[in-house]
Each structure stands twice: as C-alpha cells, then as structure tokens.
Amino acid sequence: MREHIQTTLRWAGDWPWWMGLGVGLALAAVAWVLYRRDGREGSPVLRYGLPSLRALAVLMIVLMLSGPVLHHRKVTGELAHLIVALDGSESMQLTDTAMDAGRKIAIAQRLGLLEGSGASLEMPNAAGKLADARNGAASIAALDPSALGSVIDKARAEFAALVNEADGLLDKGSKDRDFVNRFRGEITGPARKLAEMELKAVDDRTRAAAELTRLGELAGRWSREVSEQFQHQLENDPAAAPLREALAKFDGMPRSVRVQALLLEGKPEQRMLGRLAAQHDVQLVTMDNGVVKQVWQPSSEQSSLPSQLPTPKGEITNLTSGLEFAIGNQGHAEKAAVILISDGQHNAGPAPLDTAKVLGGRKVPVYTIGIGSQVPPRDLAVVRTIVPDSVFHEDRVRGTVVLKEEVPPGLPFTVSVKDGDKVVWQKALVTEGRPSRQVPFEFEVKDIAAARMKEINAAKSGYELLGAPIALTVSVTGIEGDRELSNNEAPMRFRAVTQKRKILILDGRPRWETRYLRNLFTRDEKWEVSTVIAGTTSDAGFIRGDKPDTFPNDSRLLESYDLIVFGELPKTLLKDEELKWIADFANKRGGAVLFIDGPRGLLRQYVDTPMGPMLPVEWPAGSQPIRNGIKSLSLTERAGGLGAFSLSADLGTNADTWAKLPAPHWLSGAVPLPGAEVLLEAEAGAAKVPAAVLRPFGAGRVYYQAFDDSWRWRYEVADQYHVKFWNQLADFVAEAPFAAKDKYVSLDAGQLTYQPGDNADLRVRLRGADGKPVTDASVEAALYKDGQKVATITLTPDPGGLYRGKTAVLEPGNYEVAVETAAVPEGQLRARTQFTVTARESAERTILSLNEDLLRQISSASGGEYVREERADSLIDKLAPLSAGKVEESDTVLWQDWWWFTPIVALLTIEWILRKRSGML
C-alpha cells in the first residue's frame, strides 16, 4: 500500500513567525555585541565563538514566542483529488432576510446559533428531508431512459425513505393535523407505492422514472409549504422568543460569513474543510472575476487550515471558470470530484452546463452547494441602460432603461435621468409584477452639451474638441421596503458630437433618388448638405467655388467633406484634375463615395479616367441594363450581419422585410471586381444579380448601387425604411468622426468608456503644414492615466495619412491620449482626447436570490448532486468512497518539546565549558 509522509514547520504562537524572527535577530545581535567584549583579549574561537553561541540561544528562546510546531501528514493509500471552488463574487456579500424561516433555522442550527434555545426543529428538518428527496428525483429526470437500469430501484427506495422520515418529523412538529393528513395523502402514500412497484420491463422503469419526477416536484412544493407552516407557528408562539432572536442574528450574516463558518469554524468535527481534507487531497480555490486563485492545499507548504477565506469582491460570477480549472487540474489521482459553493448567479463567460458535461464524461462529478435564499426579496433595480455611443448635440437622446421588478404589482415609483442634481427626464410608473421591464426615454441634449463644452473649452487650448463626453445617472425611487438600494442607480454615458459631418451630392440631372437623398440628409441635423445638380443653375454645367451648393474649386475644400454621393454625371462636366481630387478623396483622405448608377449608363464612362481604379464594378462588353423579370431584393450573408442593412430588429424578420420592399425597375448589369463585396442581390429571372457592392479603396470606402429607385420603398410606409437605410449606410461607409483635432492632427480613442481588461482603439490622421496627408512618418501615441504618463504606443500607418494602434489591457482610471511625432514642429501637437475605464455595471447586486435550477443542472450534467447549505455536511459521507486511503495528521510542539530545549541547553552548556576552560569564570 502506498504511504506518503510530509512534515512541515508551522507557527502557532502569540507572535507571527516574522515578528519572532525579527525580534530574535535584533536581540541576538545585541547579545553578540555585549558578549563580544568578554573575549576581546582571547583567541579567535573565544572572541567570535562565545558571543555566537549566546546569540543563537537568545534567538531560539525568542522564537518560542512564535510557537514553532512540526506538522506531520501521513497519507496511506490513494486519495481522490477534491477541488472546492468558492464563488468569490460580490453577491456572496449579500444577506438573506427573505429566506423562509425553516431554512434559516436549519442553517442557524448548523452554525450553532440555536444552542440553549430549546427550539423544536422537527418541521425545518422535515423540510430539509423533502428538499433532499426533490434533488434525488431531479437527478433521475436528467438520465436517458436507456441508462435507468437498477438506478431507478435505488432512487425510488431512497426517495420513499426520505419522505417517510419527513412524515415522522412532521407528525411530531406540526400542530395542524389536516396539514399532516394532506401530506400523507399527496406524497407519503404514492412514494411508498412507487417503492413497492415491480419493474419487469423497460416501459415499467420509464413510467417509474416519470412518476418519481412528478413526486420530486411535489416534494419540492411540500418543502416550501412545511417551511411556511413552521414560520406561521413561529410567529404565533410566545415561547419562541429565543428562536426569533437567533433568526435576527442570521439575518445579519452575509453569505460569505456563513461559508466561512461552514468550512472553517466550530468544533473540529464541524469544520467541513478539515473533515474533507482528512479523507481526500483537497484543493481550495476561489473564482474571482473569472480568474481561479488557489487559497489552500494541505499537500503544499501551507498545511494548516486557513484562518480566513478571501473577501468576495468580484464584479462578475463565472462558474465556468471553476469547472474549466477542474478539467485542467485533475492531477494524477485516479478519482476526482468538484464541490462548487455558490449562489448560482452566473452572469459572465460561457454557459457552465457544457463544461459540466465534459467533467461528467471524465467521471469527475460536480457537487454543488447552494448558498442563499431561493425566495427573491423585494427589490427594484436598474439593470442597465441602452443608449447610442454618440448623439449629435442638437438632437434628442433616445434609449431604454432595463429594470428588474421583483416587487408586487401596483406599486408607484419614479424613474429619472439626472445630470448631477438636475433632473433631465423623469417618468412616474406603476410596477407590473414582471421580472424584467424596459422603459423608453427621450430628452434633448443641447443644453447639457453646451454646458460641457463650456467647461472643456475653458480648460483646454490650441485644439478643437469635436464632441462633449456626457455622464448622467439613471435612478429609480419610491418602493417601500426595497431590499437593495445600491442597485437603484446606473450610469449613462455617451458623446454629444458638436461638429456636423459634411456630405456633397453630385448629379447630372434632377432625379427622384437624388431629391429624396438631399431632403432626408438636410432634415438630419448631424449632416451639412451641399448639392450640385448640372443644368439647374447654369447651362454650362457645375458652378465651382467655395460656397455651399458649388463644386469645390480647391482639393482641400473637397477634403473637408466626409461623404460624396456621385450620381449619373457626364464625365465631360469634370476636369481631369477634379476627377483625381475625387479619387484622392477616397484613397488618401479616407473619405467615402456612394455611386448611384442610372439607366443612361453614364458611370461606365469613368472606367478610363483617374476615377476608374476606385470603381468597385465593371461592365462586361456588350452588357445591357436589366429591365424585365426583376422580382425582389435580398441580403447576402455579409450584409445580413451589418447594422447598416438592418431594417428590422429580428434577423429572420429583417430578411422578410427586404424581400417585401418594392423591387427595382431596372439594374445596371455591372459585375463586382475582385476584392469587392456584394451586399444586395436582386432576383432577376432565374439568376441572382448584384444590386449593391462595397470595396475599400486606399484609406476610404466606395459603395456602388446598380439602381436608382430606392425612393419607391416609401410607398405606403413613408420614411420607415428609406430614411433608416440611407442614414445607416452613410454612417457605415463614412469614416467615423474624430474626437479632437488641431492644425496637424485629428485624434480619436474609440469609445468614451471602456471596461477593465479592454484595449482602446487609437486612430490618428496626420497632415503637414500644407494640409496634405503625411504618410511616411513615425507616429506614437502617449497614454496618460490620472495625469501620469503610463505608456507610449507605436502606431501603424494606413493609407491616406491614417495611423492606428491599440493600448495594452486597461485598468480603471481616467485616461488622456496625445500624439508624438517628429514630422510636426515641436510644440505644435496640441490635440488631446480622453476616455474613462470604469468597472462593469455589476450584475452582482441585481439578481439577489439563489439560482437553484442552474446549480442542480450542473450537478445532474456531471453525475454529481445538489444540496443546500444547511445540508452541506451530507456530502462528506457521499464523497468518502472516492478515496481508497486515509490521512493521519499530528503535531510536534517544538517549543514545548525536548527537540527545542535540548539545543538551547547544549548551546549554553558549550558556552559555559569554553568560559570555564579559558578562565573567564
């Protein structure tokens, strides 16, 4: 039989080891200096040996105050590897005042709060037996019928035994005989019949499993009813005052404190962790923000039980992390198991059930211990706010507040959006009694943005900020008895864009498509529209100049636009240099161009011009426009995943919406070039014909549309689809606005708010003194956190003077980004942009109840078992068969043993002998 003995040094005295060692070394040094004087005239042995002997003796005497102990751990046989995974999230700091009295008393009894109270605990114990019966039946329900075999025989016998025990306890504890008789009729009798049923065929086992599942659900309901019955008796019993006092103490105990008591406190026979460690190779870990951290393992240097568990502070609960840790840390043991201690509120990371099934396949069962109350307390909470990342400063903010309502219906409350103490939006509501509720809101942002910009402009100099960061607060108030007030508020953050984006619409003649596009972009306050239609203002063609509604007479004026809509324009209207300006607008400036073809086929003329390379399509020789048999439009797979082509919130409904839009009356017959993406197709006869194509060109994007009658989508629905599509498409193809700029640099850091662990996307456009893009410079971004420079990020060049980069993983704080490059004269780079890294909006104090269903499913999927915290000790006997060995532990208290005193006496004796022989005594 395998035997392993491990001896480790521990410190069990009044002083910690580091204090005893520090003080001991200090006093030993003093003793060495003092005794050094006695042997100053003697030999080197006396000069250095005598004080060293005395100093060493002093050190060992002082170290006795730290209580040195040799701990011996003898392992005989093979131990199973048992991973005990603790939920380290913030929700484990919650208390459970809403828990039913029966469960409270059972837990209080386990914690020793009821000693001397004289309480009669038959009914809460009966409720516990019924909960165990329900869990056993649930494990059978998860099995495949082919796997029932003899398992069903054992399960129905155990179920009947637990129900019979509950029956006996209920008979003694309940004062309501009708209640007891109803229990016996509904569950005790049927459980006995089920246990006595003869199972001769497979169908008999299947029917027995179905009946056991039904009775299991009934046992769960009766467990709750017994607890409620006991609570009613408790409230009306004057002699139960000590019991009520014990329950008040329980109400003040957070879940983590109860876990601490369960694992580490009480008499030795009550410390669950120690009892497990006496039978298995135990590894205690905590799941903290999705990271598994080891707390204790007796086979390591820290052999004694920890005195304190880590305080749970995690902002998320990721139960999968603990299960994945178990997969990778089974060790060399033949058998292993996991004990998962949690409230079950998994709110981040992959779903844990698949990982539990993997563990089950490896014969590693997961035993879950549910901590907390399955009864949700009265609580109204702001779960999150849904709001756009950016809003034009003259527009209105539209969004949704998601609420959790675990309160009775009909209670009045108020939801508000505040800027500091000022209410910017408010609505009085009445609870609906639904777990989740969405409340839409809408308010003007102009005044808020103006105030923010005034503050910002007063603090900065030398550069222009193109958007005001705005942070507001959403809150709910007014519910009496709200259990958790910390979840009544949530932040709302977005950027109010203060600079309009510019769009230039060009066409060779008035068309319905052009007219509607001009009107819809003109009505949109975030766009500044300039329209040039040949022939409407001059017989000679375009009017060129630097005014609105003229074609720019300088390339730098053209580069001030963000988007060009290019219609059916005869190429003779534009000069070669102007054609090159448009190509450079996309290629170097990073602008977006939307080509909208027409039935006259004029865009074909540009193939051999400076604009030819930017076209994403070609027209095969002899190709003609398609005018017959066009049935409907449809999205390609690529477009189906783009928000720009989303006309309906639901993916399936969105495809149907596109199919029902009025089909084009004609198509240009163009085909996409290599590297171009087809976004829209039209069914024409038996073929799918490209209707919209997108291709990157240099730093920009080019979109081509093979028809010009999208305005027909307005038929009977007005702006519902037409306006939505073109607004979304313009935002999609055009370059995202920068946050700040100066003469040389445009700068952006992506989002206004990031979460810890994210990386910020940095984007810089660099121009020279002449306003032209600088494409070959070395550019770096300087990152400041809370005013201190923390990083320098080298940016990678893209076409058109654009440079990109990513920060490292971010920690919470306020950040600022600046640009550093030798391509710009020193002191001329003034643009700055800011962002904030804040902790996640914690879901830990939103859902306050125990999620028993998830914990039960994890156990069933892995072949384990679920128990509530008051029944946790039952797992010790269930897990015992896993290990084919035993652990024996003992201590040698050195500071009370001859092993310690003998060296001290020997040191002093040797010193005395040396002194005697040298004549120093």
Image: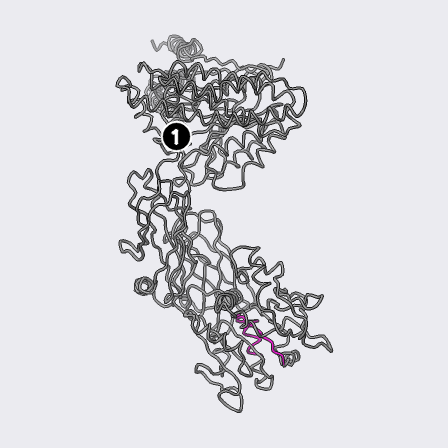
Answer whether residue 582 is magenta in the image. yes
**What colouring style does the render use?**
one colour
Quick check: can you spot residue 614?
A: no
120 left or right, relative to 604: left
Q: Residue at x 35, y 31 (%)?
A: 98
For the residue pair 259 and 426, the one nearer the viewer reads as: 426
For the residue pair 361 and 653, the one nearer the viewer reads as: 653
The quadrant of the picture occupied by the C terminus is: top left
Give the amino acid type for the residue marked by disc 1 in the picture: Arg
Say if 785 sits above or below 767 in the image: above
Q: Position of residue 46 (x, y in %)?
A: 40, 16
Give the total number of marks visible in the rendering.
1
Q: Position of residue 410 (x, y in %)?
A: 33, 44
For the residue pair 579 and 408, the one nearer the viewer reads as: 408
Query: Start and end of the magenta stretch?
Result: 580-599
For the residue pair 240 and 490, the one nearer the viewer reads as: 240
The quadrant of the picture occupied by the N terminus is: top right
Say if 786 sits above or below 322 in the image: below
Answer whether residue 267 is magenta in the image. no
Say if 318 sits above or below 708 in the image: above
Asked where in the image residue 195 lies, by quadrant, the reply is top right
Farthest bottom residue?
539
Quick check: can you spot residue 21?
A: yes
Circle 1 residue: 255
Q: Residue at x 58, y 32 (%)?
A: 327
Badge 1 marks a residue whose secondary structure is: helix
Q: Position of residue 242 (x, y in %)?
A: 28, 19
Q: Position of residue 87 (x, y in %)?
A: 45, 33
292 left or right, relative to 696: left
